[in-house]
Amino acid sequence: MQHPVYCERCADEIGSQGDLVTVLKLPSVIAAYHVRCYGLEAKGLNAFGTPLNSVSLIWLMVVFGLLCLFLFVANSFNPAFLIIACIIPLLRLGSWLVVERHISHSSAT
Ligand SMILES: [Zn+2]
């Protein structure tokens, strides 16, 4: 079921996934922005301000996952590294569950 998603910066409704940027931000955990508002807000964001619905996060997920897999094998199969490897995919899933599934895929601008 879809419901309106509002931008954290300008409070206007975000109409399409093409105009959506989700970031990790406390206290709401996952914040939604228009693409232009993210650009304006990015100066004030910390390292956690990497967009969750971006190609760069997918690359980060792959590299971080491989690193954790290496550490898992190198440290006598310590399951803690598998748990750590799940953090980024869980954030990506959270971004989809909380925000992205409520917005249409059409990229009307
Ligand atoms: Zn906005």
Image (cartoon, grey):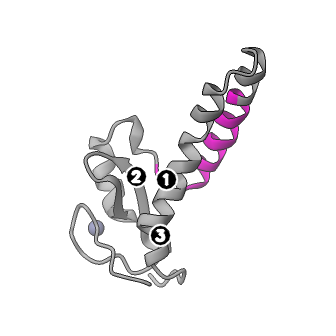
Q: Is residue 18 left or right of residue 3?
A: right
Q: Say which amino acid is labelled 1.
A: Leu
Disc 3 crowd rating (10 Å Cα; few below 14, some 14-19, many 20+) is many
The structure residue drawn at horizontal position 29% and vertical position 78%, both measured from the top left corner, is 13
Badge 1 vs badge 2, beta-carbon distance below 8 Å:
yes
**In x, y percent, where is residue 71?**
71, 21
Please say whether residue 53 is visible from this viewpoint: no
Which numbered marker is on residue 23? 2
- Mark 3 vs 1, N-terminal side: 1
Q: Which of 91 and 53 is in front in this view?
A: 91
Residue 63 magenta: yes
Three-letter code, disc 2? Val
The one nearer the camera, 76 or 92, is: 76
Q: Hey, which residue is sitting farthest top in the picture?
A: 75
The reply to whether the residue tagged 1 has its Cβ within 8 angstroms of ligand 1 is: no
Identify the image quadrant of the C terminus: bottom left
Q: Mark 3 points at which residue?
A: 100
Secondary structure at badge 2 equals strand
In the rendered view, would you say 24 is above or below 33?
above
Q: Earlier in the sequence, mark 3 or mark 2?
A: 2
Q: Do the residues labelled 3 and 2 touch (CB within 8 Å)?
A: no
Separation (CA) of disc 1 from disc 2: 5 Å
Residue at left offset 74%, top offset 29%? 69
The quadrant where residue 26 appears:
top left
- The answer to whether residue 29 is above or below residue 35 is above
Q: Where in the figure is residue 57, as x and y percent of width and height?
A: 57, 47
Q: What element carries label 1?
A: loop
Q: Give the range drawn in magenta.
A: 51-68
Q: Give yes or no for residue 12 being in the magenta stretch.
A: no
Residue of label 1 = 52
Residue 30 picture location, percent across and down: 37, 55
